[in-house]
Amino acid sequence: MSVGCLILACTLLVGASSGNKAVQPLKAPCRPGFSQNFYTVIVSRDVLHGQSILKDTTLSSERVKFEDCQRSSREVGFVSSDPNFGVRPDGTVYAEQEVANLSEPVQFMVTARELHDPHIWETTVKLALAGHPHPLPLTKVGIEEMLSRVWDSQPRIIRFPRRHQRGSSVNGLRRQKRDWVIPPINVPENSRGPFPHMLVRIRSDQDKDVGIRYSITGAGADQPPSGIYNIDPISGNMFVTQPLDREERASFHLRAHAVDMNGNQVENPIDLYIYVIDMNDNRPEFQNQVYNGSVAEGSKPGSSVMQVTATDSDDSTTANGMVRYRILSQTPHSPIPNMFTINSETGHIVTVAAGLDREKVSQYTIIVQATDMEGNLNFGLSNTATALISITDINDNPPELTVRTFSGEVPENKVNVVVTNLTVVDRDQPHSPNWNAVYRIVSGDPSGHFTIRTNPITNEGMLTVVKPVDFEMNRAFMLTVVVSNQAHLASGIQSSLQSTAGVTISVQDVNEPPVFPVNPKMIRFEEGVPAGTTLTVFAAQDPDHFIHQIVRYSKLSDPANWLKINRTNGQITTMALLDRESMYVKNNVYEATFLAFDNGSPQASGTGTLQIYLIDVNDNAPVLIPREAQVCERAHPHSRINITASDADTDPNVGPFVFELPTFPASVRRNWTISRLSGDYAQLRLRIPYLESAVYEFPIIVSDSGNPPLSNRSLIRVKVCPCDDNGDCSATGAVAAAGLGTGAIIAILICIIILLTMVLLFVVWMKRREKERQAKPLLIDPEDDVRDNILKYDEEGGGEEDQDYDLSQLQQPESLDHIINKPAGVRRVDERPVITESQYPVRPSLPHPGDIGDFINDGLRAADNDPTAPPYDSLLVFDYEGSGSTAGSVSSLNSTSSGDQDYDFLNDWGPRFKKLADLYGGGDDD
C-alpha cells in the first residue's frame, strides 16, 4: 500500500470485551458505547488528506441497541477533538487535511452524542508511527500539544438554526431533518490557558439586517458557579475564563440568546452543552494503605485470602477511571515467589500454589499496585498499597516428647510432690489449642498414685503424687505416658512415635513413725478400780521393716491424771481411783493419748488414743429435791409438797427411790407424813390440822435401788404460813413465816416511811404549782379561754320553709309608718303584730318546789298562743346595726320585779339547782 494509504483499519463493535478483533453478534442485552476505551492505530509518517484511518461501523445511541438487536435506526453524531482529524457519520476516522511528516504520536478524543440526548460517549484514539516497535508514551510536551489541539477542535461558528433549511453543514456537523444538531463543546480540564480562551462564535443570520446583541444564561454563566463562561454581546464570541476540573463539574448546560437593540427576541434560544473532557489527572487511591488478611496453612490453590479496593476520581466510563490491579512483590519468596495472585478487576487475592506452612513462614507482605487506563503502564497512573497476609495455624504438628524415657524420685508417704517434668516440643501456634499439651498415664499405675498436670506457660507435664506410696510395698514404678493436643490433629496428620514415653519412678525410704494397730483402742472397766491396777498393753509397731529400731512410749494427754504407761512395753496402769461421775468422763468414756517414738534419724513419732469405758457401780447416794418448800398452816388439799431425788449413778443404781421420815425427833412423824406417788416421786404434807406459822427444818431419808442400796439423810426447810382460799401464802403470813429478825423489820419500816415522805412532798409541790399558775395572768384572751365559759354557737335554721329569705329585711327601714298603716289581716310572717302583747304568767316570789313544773307548762302555752311572737319557721329579725336603729338603749331595760329578789329558796330545790343557788343566793359574801 502506498504512502498515505490506510496501514491498519479495524472494525470494532460497541460493548465488545477485547481489542482489535471482530466480535460475533451478542445474544445478551446490548450496551451502548464504543467498543474500546482506547484505540491504537499504526500509520505511516505521511497521512494524506481524506485517508481513512479507523472505522467503527456499529455504534448506536444510548437507547438503541446494535444492528443485531434491530435498533440501529437512530443516528449519532461524532466530533473529534483534533482539527486535523474528523469522524464520518459511519464512524470512520479520517484526516481532514494532509498531514505531512507526522514525527510524534498523536492522541485525540472522539465524542459521540445522539440528537436531543445529553449523554455522550468518549474514546481515545492514538496514532503511532509506523516502524516503532512499541507505542511511545505521551510526554508532558505531547500532552500540552494535544490539549492545544483540543482547543482548536471546537467548531468556530454556531448559527441559530433555521427551520426548513436543507443541504448545508458547518465544520462537519451533521444536519438533521428539521434542526441543526448542535454538537457539544468539548473543553479539556486542567488547561493552562491563556484565559479567556475563545470557544465558539454565536451568530444569527439576521445580524446583517439589524443590530444583534448576544447573551448566554445558565450555571457557569449568570448562575453559580458564575463567571466561568462569558460572551461578547456584539461579536458573539464565547469564552471560557478559567481552568476547569471535571471532578468538580463534568458538564454545563447554557442557553444562547439573540435580541435586537430594543431587547426583542430575534432568534429562539439555542441549547449549548459544554462537556469537560476528562484527563487522566488522578491516581487510583486505595481505601487503606495497609490491608490485613489471613489464610490457613495448607490451603489449596484458589483459596480466597482478602480483597483490596482502589478508587479513581477520573471518569469511570473511560480508561482514565478504570483501575486494574497487579502484585508487584511478595516477601518472603518461600516456598515460591508467586504464592498469590490478584484478580485484576476486583482486587481479590487468592492462593495459586500449595505449600503454605505457618511454621516456616507465618506472614507474607505483598505490594499491590493499582493502575488506571485499564492497567496500561505506559499511560496510566499508579499507586501502591501493602497487603499483610497472616498464615493461620492448624494442628498439623503433633506434640513430641523430648526424650523416650524420664526418671524421678519420690519419698514415701508424701503427696502433692512433683516427681519429674515431662518436656514436649510442638511447632504449632503457642498457647493455642493446637499447642496446648494433654498428658495421660496409660499403664504402670493401677492404684492411681500419680497424675500429670500441664504447666500452662511452658507446656511441660508435671508428674505429681496424689496418693502416698509405701517403700515397703513398692520400691519403684514404671509408667507409660502419652501426650496429645487439646485440638484434634488436622486431617491426614498422623501421631508421632515420640508422643509416647516411659517414666521410671524410684520410691525413697524414709523413717516412718510407729503405728498403733488399733487406734483408738477401747477397753471396759468398772469404776472404782484402785490405783496400781493394770488395764492393758497399748503397744505400737514400727513400719520400717528393713531397719531395726527401738520404740519407746510416753503419756501425751491424761486429763484426770489417772494413768501411766510403761516406757518400754506400753503397759497401762492406774495411778488413782477411776470415777465414772468425774467431769472428765464423757458418756461413760474416759480418753487418754499416748506417744510412741523410735530411735531413727530423724526421730519419728506416732500417737494413739486409749478409750476406757467405765461401768457404773452404786457409789453415790441419792440427794433430796427440793431442799426448801412452803405449806399452809392449816391442812389444805392444795397445800402439799412434791419431793424427788437426784442420783449421780445410772441404771440400775438409781430409782425407784424410797422416802422415809426419821423416828427421831418424834415431832417429825407427829406433824408430817410422806405418801408415795411413783417410783421417783413422793408427797410431803401435814399430818395435823394446824401447825403454827414458822420455818421448820427436819431430815428425810432417801434410798436408791442399788445392790446394795445407798441411803442419804437430807434436810428440808419448810415454811409454814397462813393461806388464802386458793391455798397461797398471804404476804403477812409469808413475812411471819420467814422469821425475819428485828433488824430486817426495822429496815422495812424505814423504807416505807421514806416512800411516804416522798409522796407527801410531791403532793405539796403540785399544790404550790397550781397556786402559782392561778396567780399568774393568762397568756390568752379570756374570750378564747374555753375553761368554764359559755360557748356561743350559731342559731339553728328552720326547715325547708325558711330557705326563701327576704333580704330586704336586712336593710335599715326609714320609718315604721308602713308597718303601722298596714291594713289589718295582711301581714308578713316575720312582722311583729301591732296589738297588745300577751300576758305571761308571773312567777311567785316564793314558789313551792312542786309548782315549778306547772309554772314552766303555763309559760310554754302562753308562748305558743302569743300572736306577737315570731313564727317557729321564719326569718328571725334581730336589732339593726348602725345609726337609726329601731332598738332602744339597753339602759331602758328594767327588772320585772322591784327591789332585791331573795333566791335562798333555790337551796331547797336539790343538788341540780345548787349552782344557781350559789350564783344568786344571798349572804354577806356576795
Image (tube, helix red, strand yellow):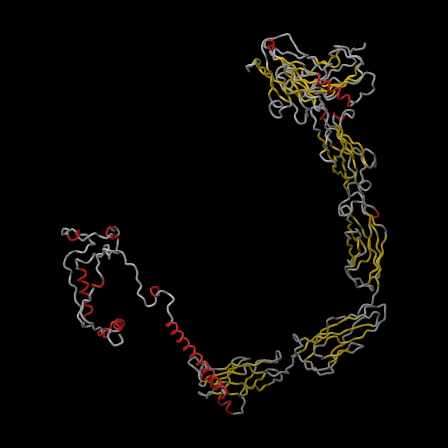
Q: Position of residue 863 (x, y in %)?
A: 19, 61
Q: Is residue 321 visible?
A: yes
Query: From the image, which quarter does the N terminus lie in?
Result: top right
Quarter of the view holding residue 627: bottom right
Using residue 203 as the reference point, say whether residue 39 is left or right of it: right
Relative to 12, does residue 449 appear above or below in the rendering?
below
Q: Position of residue 511 (x, y in %)?
A: 82, 68
Relative to 90, does residue 229 appear above or below in the rendering?
below
Q: Position of residue 274 (x, y in %)?
A: 65, 20
- Residue at the extreme top of the image, as rendered: 167
Q: Nearer the viewer, residue 15 or 252?
A: 252
Query: From the image, which quarter does the C terminus lie in?
Result: bottom left
Relative to 133, does residue 658 appear above or below in the rendering?
below
Using residue 496 as the reference point, say whether residue 111 is left or right of it: left
Q: Position of residue 245 (x, y in %)?
A: 68, 25
Using residue 112 as the reference point, say whether residue 491 is left or right of it: right
Using residue 168 as the reference point, say whether residue 491 is left or right of it: right
Relative to 700, does residue 151 appear above or below in the rendering?
above
Quarter of the view holding residue 15: top right
